[in-house]
Amino acid sequence: MKLRRKVAAVRRRMLCLWLLLLGLSLAMLGMSDFLNHKDLHAADPSRRPLQWLPSPPELEVIVDSLDPAMELGVDTAPLKSLQEDQLLFVFPSAQGTWTQQERKRSYKMFKRGTFKDATAAGPLGSVRGRTGSIQMEMEQASVQRHGFNEALSETISLHRRPPEARHPECFGEKYSEILPSASVVICFHEEPWSTLMRTVHSVLDTSPRQYLQEVLLVDDLSQNRHLKARLGSYVSGLDGVRLIHSTRRLGVGGCRTMAAAKAKGQVLVFMDSHCECHEGWLEPLLERVSQDRSRVVSPVMDVIDWKTFQYNATQWPVRGVFDWRLDFYWELNPPLQEIPPEEAVLPLQSPALGGGVLAIDRNFFQSVGAYDPGMLLWGAEQIELSIRVWSCGGSMEVVPCSRVAHLSRHHLPYIFPDQEMLRRNKIRVADIWMDAYKKIYYRRDTLAHLIKQSESPNIAERLRLKRSLGCRNFHWFLSTVYPQLYVPQDKLALSGELYNVGTGNCADYAREEQQQGAGMNIAPCSGTGSQHCEFNSEGEVRWGSMGSLCMHVKGNKVVLSPCSAHQPTNRGLKWKFIKLSGQLVHQQSQMCVEAVQQAGLLQSKTGEVHKPTAGGLYLKPCTRHPRQQWHFEQLVAPKGN
Ligand code: UDP
Ligand code: MN
């Protein structure tokens, strides 16, 4: 009896203890929920938001282990958010078992399309039911802030799919059943919620699970709240998505290099944080990389309009190129000698690829030197990688049956600590990869030349890499990979700004009319290299950053139009420059170029007043008038570095 009572007492005590424990844990859960809730709606921005970290094994916490070699020269510290992110933490899917149901059970889920950015929620929340003009104002404000119409983007499904744009031949294409696994790396800095999550969902919705190792989201030290705890909590409910918060601002290349070191897939697919994938985009890319591990490939990049969010299919064929100012372009209908008959489905070799979406074998990426760690946050990294891949044994191509749309932007939304960051990156590209051809760049970007003279960028490490990989020189690149790029001769006294003695101005042209045959005009000499032109041994006067615009005439007006549109023997394109008199003579007509300055307002018959034109270049009978006297003024000396 005594014993039974004792046992009962012990049982009662145990029960109490259990109840106490249960009560405590319930209270804790409630608290954490409350704290988390508070964080979501915290009104006081100065208050440091509380981090809600789910307990292990749901969250793997890794102390920041960034390789110091990867850290860039530019440090944006002291940023406030640094304290919140002292840890680099990774949400797991690492174990490879994607049991969505399990994941969902342990995390709160935001319903699709219901999430609002705390800072953007105000405008969006209030838009519905109000007038169109308020909506327009808000859209304008969001364009101002993000460089695209984020207010409109928030009203569009996170799961929308672009309309079919692939060539019908693509549907007959067969891919290997065994393809390498892919890590889709999405680095972002202050990306709005809707575009970021539409990117993530479109990858998840369109990629066959057997090939998708993971989506690796990397927050490049964003400060916006929605990209912190809430993003972690949302993403943890998504199958196969890992999230890394960097504790340093790494920039586009640095961030991708860091992610590559953490990625587990055999192929890295770098993707911008505002993309939308087509059905079947991944397989053709993986197929091409698996056939040749040194092949770097890109889908056809369609365009999402920054204002309307409309999708615009890019016409095939298209390839990536760059010009002598080291700016990148997608070139439609490239002027290639041989276009294969089955061009609709055959990949097209490309001198360069944009950074929007890029698939590269992980080992090849590492062995070819990842991204240049000396590059600053943004710009020209795609050109650097392109020249390096080609020169050091790899190749690049655009794959037509793979399509991904990228959001075009009205303007860049970032505030960079360094105004001349892009130029500094270009200087690295020129100095490391272009040998003597770098002069062609510096003549067209004189500010870069000035910067370069006053600073000496540390490129020793990359030159060592270039040597150790046995990379070919830029002459090889130009003659083998990109023979279509015109190589300017830039002869002394026959190239530079075309200065007019009579007006004290320089010859220039309207950039926006380039394709139709831009009328030439005169404008104050810029000194920047933007007015650079050259008179070459063919007798052509070449303009534009590709050197592809030729001076010729329309009636008596001097205009520019694509050189390739004319026969090389076309006498209408040929000029003679008489150094002594400074006369520029049109060979066919034997007339001289004269700068005409038009002043005052022009009144038409209807009484309309037109703006004064900036003047123009006209063919006139040759005289000794100073307005027919020209000098080529070279701004960057031919010798030295
Ligand atoms: N990005 C980044 N860190 C930066 C700047 C950009 O992670 O310091 C990301 C950005 O969010 C985007 C990608 O890198 O996902 C490429 O940048 P962006 O889209 O601005 O380049 P663009 O497409 O305009 O060339
Ligand atoms: Mn982009």
Image (cartoon, rainbow, N blue to C red):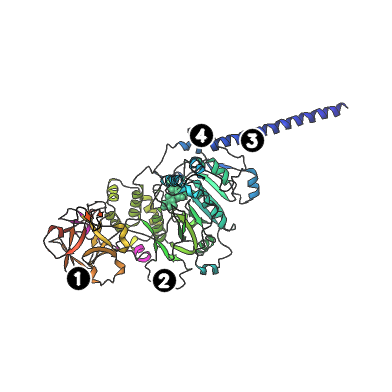
| Tag 2 residue | 339
The disc at residue 43 is 4
x and y, in percent, of residue 230 in the image: 55, 42
Q: Is residue 493 magenta?
A: yes
Label 2 vs 4, first from the N-terminus: 4
Magenta span: predominant SS is loop
Amino acid found under the numbered disc labelled 2: Ile
Label 2 vs 1, first from the N-terminus: 2
Mark 3 or 4: the one toward you? 4
Give the residues in magenta: 476-505
Which of these two is toward me, 593 or 86? 593
Estimate the spatial distance between the alpha carbons at disc 3 and disc 4, rounded to whole Å. Answer: 23 Å
| Tag 3 residue | 29
Residue farthest front in this picture: 606
Q: Secondary structure at mark 2?
A: loop
| Tag 1 residue | 588
